[in-house]
């Protein structure tokens, strides 16, 4: 939910701080030229020194439009039973058109105290690409409700009026900072893969997650953060406590937004599963059971970051929080009436309410970063994260338990629990950053090459164990998880003409080594798991060109291309979402 | 005294092993009063026809003769720079710095290193103060410049302006930079001689710089540390878009500061390690340089620029005749993977302060390329506070453009602590 109800106190505070602020520095109009400073042979010149003080207030802001168009020619396809076998039909549709105003204010009344505030207002056009959104609320299904689905996505996730950040930082001692309020915290070095970056959830609904800055997509949380500097140990400790404050925030704003809720940048309607009893046509609504009780559902963790010599840094992290994505199905409900004769429930609705939850989990992380000095100037980073018990949803044929009959507030329901598997997951990522020169091409600035290799291991998973199969995305059997999963990403960038042009190319590939093999024998389907070659998988390629126009204007044009052997797995979900995207920003 | 004993000194040099040649001159009677006389040398007198209070420009700069070196002459002739002349005034460092020089100069020794060796420190025994009060070769002058008195720490709030001759200011940024120049070898502020924790890590310098403007650079911050040994400068950059501080190398030879005309190593004339260049002392000279420049620091500092004409980046400051060492350098750190853009540089090192007001750069093909100018104002208390850096300009003579650095606030010896330049502090300063 992006439009939020405000209490009057918050608005008064926000406007008070903005109105009372000093304007950000801007280029002054050229003054009349004064005569050169006078000098006498005897005494020289007395020049005033240190005559200026930094303003205690700084406010900056920007206006931005970001618009995109889908350019992939993929078309939707269906089997003889009407189940989707491919998705598409996006060509020429608006992928997004979002207008954003964001203002940031900092106030430093004393060297020990500073406050930070970020206000964002976003308004978006509705896009027909969101016709495919799987709206979790009841009553939005069907072709006749396509317009309602578009508007729901726009109003719930694209439009936004929010106090993104608001905190007070107090420097209690030269080595201790205490920060209270709504904040963003990023740990780890792994960039978009977020191995140790576990504090803030992400809203990637308004554009592709990998192409937008995390600054924009992270969802700030109300938290207490303590930063302690311990120079004797050559490091610092960061402790974070997210208490959960139902009075100040909605529960759904404390978890990542499921990508099935939107269409343009979300997951398409799933194809036929082996067990379609809870297929999309059977779902009436989805309810997110977000853990949001003060204290009981709070999250806490710490990170120690230090230096082991001039060329090697390291960090250790622990986090006790909730699993971000995906939400795990817990049970379904159908209303009914109690039939005394059969001593059983007679369901009165054919569709289900699905309740999804966010299980607790521990995350333990380690990172190392080192550098090889000139002439190579190479940076190497390793980040690893251990999740002792990540919860996975089972595939459709093994997901559900036997139904139960329950009563709530006098009403009868048929409840069917889902079963999940908790598995130990180990992730690590290696990143290489290498600057180099190609002077004939760019005389002034180096190129920067970044290569990332990521490996996920789930030791207790057997790739060919059908009964024990788990999926990355509940409801999509195609996302069956392999014991070993890899990801390779590369990017190359430089800047020209003193920052006026900044081109960037990036590409990535995710091999998929385990897929389903479906054998049809008449009306019966037999699903088994099989191995694929490492060339089977999905990926992306992206080209972008950024422009700097003076101090105020920024622009970017980008083309993103997705590919995948399976339209319902990995980046194949987006293979019909090739896009040309334009961004224009005016900042002041 | 030194001239009279020159032959004896030369004979002594021939007898002492080349691997360890201590300084032979004694500076036991060095004071702030006689510093300019003992350490420096007198500038040449004014040439006929020019003097304090006059303005030197393209029409009459030939009167100054060799006081206007190559590079600066083009700036005057082609881009309209005018020099407001002021009288020479001697300079001296703080009492603490003088004392450290007096006590330590005889202990500093030069070590011979290989022609391509840029990772071995070329001196040993240095404690604090001026390493070589009587420099005899390029490396010694370079070391004097590296350890010139600039206070133990500094705070600078400055604007960086990218200016083209035709179109004027087209880009600007604003930064606040706090630096501990002397983690080791301190002379002015306690604790002496060093800041224990950082010094034990062999850190010579540490700074934090935070961008204030423009909006998309706001809160970009960098923590930089330089080591006593000639290693690459390392540090962390905080990027608001990622909300992370990322380890990085900085100041790698040949890399620009924020896509400006100034390389990292051009800062303060030359801010790399002396071992990274082959230095040749080509002689002494007297040039016009802005060592008491009269820049009006503060909110109207931009008024120091001409703002229009062929050189809108031209500063209107005071220039005086200064005794300088002329130091020529060629980069050692030059490989196929990372070719250095500079072929040759000439530093004009002030003989009293060992600051570098002027640097002229030629590219690898021997073509004149850049002039890097630094200016200082009067010190408010010359016995305790160094002259504040008041202006820096990196001028690209081939593209007729410059990057100008104008301080709104320039302070030294403010009392920064170790806790002010740590990674944790970097994170705490940023959102």
Image: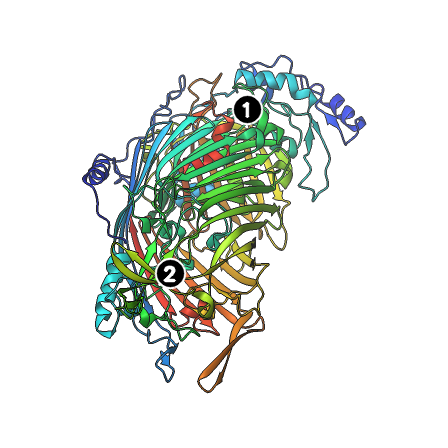
Chain of the residue displaying label 1: B
Above or below, A24 against B399 in this view is above
B66 left or right, relative to A129: right
* Quarter residue A108 falls in: top left
> Residue beneath label 2, please?
A331
Q: Position of residue A24 (x, y in %)?
A: 28, 39
Above or below, B316 against A542 in this view is above
Q: Extreme bottom residue here?
A: A522
Q: Nearer the viewer, residue A588 or A578?
A: A578
B120 left or right, relative to A295: right
Chain of the residue displaying label 2: A
- Cα separation, mark 2 vs mark 1, equals 82 Å
Name the residue located 29 percent from the left edge and 45 percent from the top edge: A249
Label 2 in the same subunit as label 1: no
Numbered mark located on residue A59 in the image: none
| Quadrant placement of the N terminus of chain A | bottom left
> Residue beneath label 1, please?
B352
Element at label 1: loop
Above or below, A98 against A561 in this view is above
User: Is residue A253 at all visible to an observer of this figure?
Assistant: yes
Q: Extreme front residue here?
A: A341
* Quarter residue B273 falls in: top right
Q: Nearer the viewer, mark 2 or mark 1?
A: 2
Q: Position of residue A563 (x, y in %)?
A: 46, 71
* Quarter residue B159 falls in: top left
């Amino acid at each position: 939910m992006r439009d939020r109800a405000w209490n009057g106190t918050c608005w008064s505070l926000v406007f008070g701080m903005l109105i009372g602020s000093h304007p950000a520095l801007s280029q002054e109009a050229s003054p009349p030229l004064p005569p050169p400073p006078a000098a006498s042979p005897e005494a020289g010149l007395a020049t005033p020194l240190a005559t200026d003080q930094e303003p205690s207030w700084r406010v900056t802001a920007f206006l931005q439009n970001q618009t995109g168009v889908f350019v992939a020619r993929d078309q939707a396809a269906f089997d003889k039973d009407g189940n989707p076998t491919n998705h598409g039909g996006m060509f020429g549709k608006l992928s997004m058109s979002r207008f954003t105003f964001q203002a940031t204010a900092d106030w430093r009344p004393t060297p020990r105290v500073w406050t930070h505030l970020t206000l964002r207002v976003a308004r978006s056009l509705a896009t027909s690409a969101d016709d495919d959104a799987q709206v979790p609320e009841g009553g939005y299904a069907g072709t006749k409700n396509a317009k309602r689905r578009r508007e729901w996505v726009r109003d719930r996730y694209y439009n936004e009026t929010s106090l993104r950040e608001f905190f007070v930082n107090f420097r209690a001692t030269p080595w201790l900072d205490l920060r209270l309020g709504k904040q963003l915290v990023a740990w780890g070095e792994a960039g978009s893969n977020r191995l140790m970056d576990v504090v803030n959830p992400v809203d990637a609904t308004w554009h592709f997650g990998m192409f937008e800055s995390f600054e924009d997509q992270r969802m700030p949380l109300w938290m207490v953060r303590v930063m302690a500097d311990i120079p004797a140990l050559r490091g610092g400790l960061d402790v974070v406590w997210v208490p959960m404050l139902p009075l100040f925030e909605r529960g759904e704003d404390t978890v990542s937004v499921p990508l099935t809720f939107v269409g343009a940048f979300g997951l398409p309607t799933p194809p036929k599963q082996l067990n379609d009893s809870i297929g999309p046509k059977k779902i009436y609504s989805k309810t997110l059971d977000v853990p949001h009780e003060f204290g009981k559902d709070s999250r806490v963790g710490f990170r120690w970051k230090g230096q082991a010599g001039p060329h090697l840094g390291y960090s250790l992290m622990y986090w006790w929080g909730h699993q971000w994505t995906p939400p795990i199905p817990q049970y379904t409900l159908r209303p009914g009436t109690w039939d005394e004769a059969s001593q059983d429930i007679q369901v009165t609705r054919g569709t289900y309410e699905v309740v999804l939850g966010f299980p607790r989990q521990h995350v333990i992380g380690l990172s190392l970063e080192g550098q090889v000095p000139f002439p190579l100037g190479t940076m190497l980073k390793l980040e690893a994260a251990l999740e002792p018990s990540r919860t996975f949803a089972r595939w459709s044929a093994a997901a559900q338990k036997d139904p139960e009959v329950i009563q709530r507030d006098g009403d009868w329901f048929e409840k069917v629990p889902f079963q999940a598997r908790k598995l130990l997951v180990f992730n690590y990522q290696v990143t290489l950053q290498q600057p180099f020169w190609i002077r004939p091409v760019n005389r002034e600035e180096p190129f920067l090459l970044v290569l990332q290799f990521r490996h996920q291991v789930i030791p207790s998973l057997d790739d060919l164990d059908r009964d024990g199969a788990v999926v990355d995305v509940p409801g999509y059997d195609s996302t069956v998880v392999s014991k070993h999963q890899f990801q390779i990403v590369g990017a190359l960038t430089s800047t020209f003409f003193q920052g006026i042009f900044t081109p960037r190319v990036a590409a990535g590939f995710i091999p998929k080594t385990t897929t389903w093999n479906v054998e049809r024998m008449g009306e019966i389907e037999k699903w088994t798991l099989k191995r694929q070659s490492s060339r089977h998988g999905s990926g992306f390629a992206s080209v972008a060109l950024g422009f700097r126009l003076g101090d105020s204007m920024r622009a970017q044009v980008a083309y993103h291309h997705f590919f995948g052997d399976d339209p319902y797995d990995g980046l194949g979900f987006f293979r019909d979402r090739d896009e040309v995207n334009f961004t224009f920003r005016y900042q002041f | 005294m030194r001239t009279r004993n020159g032959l004896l000194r030369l004979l002594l040099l021939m007898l002492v092993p080349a691997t360890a040649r201590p300084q032979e001159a004694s500076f036991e009677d060095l004071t702030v009063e006689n510093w300019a006389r003992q350490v420096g040398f007198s500038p040449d007198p004014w040439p006929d026809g020019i003097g304090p209070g006059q303005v030197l420009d393209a029409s009459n700069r030939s009167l100054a003769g060799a006081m206007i070196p190559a590079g600066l002459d083009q700036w005057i002739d082609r881009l309209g720079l005018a020099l407001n002349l002021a009288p020479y005034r001697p300079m001296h460092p703080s009492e603490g710095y003088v004392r450290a020089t007096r006590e330590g100069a005889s202990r500093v020794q030069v070590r011979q290193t290989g022609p391509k060796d840029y990772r071995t420190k070329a001196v040993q025994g240095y404690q604090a103060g001026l390493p070589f009060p009587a420099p005899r070769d390029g490396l010694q002058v370079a070391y004097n410049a590296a350890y010139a008195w600039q206070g133990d720490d500094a705070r600078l709030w400055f604007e960086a302006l990218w200016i083209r001759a035709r179109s004027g200011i087209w880009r600007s940024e604003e930064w606040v930079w706090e630096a501990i120049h002397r983690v080791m070898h301190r002379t002015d502020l306690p604790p002496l001689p060093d800041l224990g924790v950082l010094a034990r890590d062999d850190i010579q310098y540490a700074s934090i710089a935070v961008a204030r403007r423009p909006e998309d650079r706001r809160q970009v911050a960098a923590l930089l540390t330089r080591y006593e040994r000639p290693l690459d400068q390392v540090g962390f950059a905080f990027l608001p878009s990622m909300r992370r501080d990322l380890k990085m190398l900085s100041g790698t030879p040949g890399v620009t500061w924020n896509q400006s005309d100034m390389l990292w190593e051009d800062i303060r004339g030359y801010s790399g390690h002396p071992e990274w260049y082959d230095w040749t002392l080509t002689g002494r000279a007297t040039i016009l340089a802005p060592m008491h420049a009269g820049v009006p620091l503060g909110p109207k500092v931009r008024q120091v620029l001409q703002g229009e004409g062929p050189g809108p980046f031209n500063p209107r400051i005071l220039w005086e005749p200064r005794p300088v060492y002329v130091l020529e350098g060629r980069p050692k750190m030059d490989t196929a993977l990372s070719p250095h853009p500079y072929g040759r540089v000439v530093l004009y090192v002030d003989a009293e302060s060992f600051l570098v007001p002027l640097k002229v750069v030629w590219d690898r093909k021997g073509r004149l390329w850049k002039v890097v100018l630094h200016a200082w104002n009067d010190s408010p208390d010359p016995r305790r506070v160094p002259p504040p850096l008041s202006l820096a300009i990196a001028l690209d003579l081939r593209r007729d453009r410059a990057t100008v650095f104008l301080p709104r606030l320039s302070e030294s010896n403010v009392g920064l602590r170790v806790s002010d330049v740590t990674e944790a502090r970097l994170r705490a300063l940023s959102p």
